[in-house]
Image: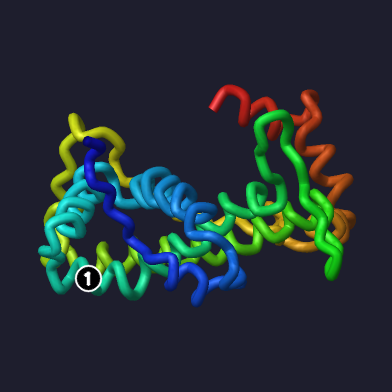
Amino acid sequence: MPAPVALFVSEQALKSFTSINQNVSPADLTPFILQAQDIELQYYLGSTFYFSIQDQVLTNTVTPDNQFLLDEYISKALCNFALERALPFIKYKMFNKSVLSPNSENADTITLEELKFLQQEVRSTAEVYMKRLVQWIINHPAAYPVYFSQIVQDGQLPSNETTFYNSLTIPAQPYAYKKRWRMGMRDNLSDCIECMTPNNSNFQQTQYN
């Protein structure tokens, strides 16, 4: 007999919180909810805390603090992580002989590039909720002692990643810094070159001091 499986978010919540149509079969969604919580959620919570919440869900003994996490952060993040993973398989269906992309008579299917864009958008939303989840836990350490007492033998430790990635590229240097530097140094450029000339006495003194 297979072991019971704990779903941290329901099919109804997934359809209510995302753009998934109500006529999508639960069988098309459940595998991706399981993948999202087992991969993404465990990545942020660490295996020890993840398994702890999983056991509480299975035994219907979820603590108020953990229930708050499930309602306010985990369910919202998992809805988007699950949708990200489900999107390619909603578009492409696997049959006995091939992988097909069924066409609708009433609507046009999206391109692969449009599909990737949708995946990035829902993932960005999910990551926002996960960052808020981790920040809430860090700000309330007394309520989540399991998170701060991870057991290495349980598996993955919580991610300490703090960088949020999106499509915006921020330059490493200030805007037009080279131009401003050249303008500020132009008048003193000849003096700087003279100072750094090996025959200059100041340069010799710098060398031996």
Q: Is residue 33 above or below residue 70?
A: above
Q: Which residue is mark 1?
A: 67
48 or 4, nearer to the observer: 4
135 or 112, nearer to the observer: 112
Q: Is residue 181 visible?
A: no
- Percent across and percent down for residue 178 are 82, 54
**Crowding at label 1, few (<14), some or many (≥20) Cα neighbours within 10 Å?**
some
**Type of amino acid at the residue the image marks with label 1:** Gln
- Percent across and percent down for residue 87 are 64, 54
Tell me what residue is drawn at x 84 percent, y 70 percent. Answer: 106
Q: Quadrant of residue 137?
A: bottom left
| Horizontal side, residue 87 vs residue 188: left or right | left
111 or 153, nearer to the observer: 111
| Horizontal side, residue 36 vs residue 194: left or right | left
Q: Secondary structure at mark 1?
A: helix
Where the N terminus falls, by quadrant?
A: top left
Tell me what residue is drawn at x 25 percent, y 69 percent. Answer: 139
Tell me what residue is drawn at x 22 percent, y 70 percent. Answer: 67
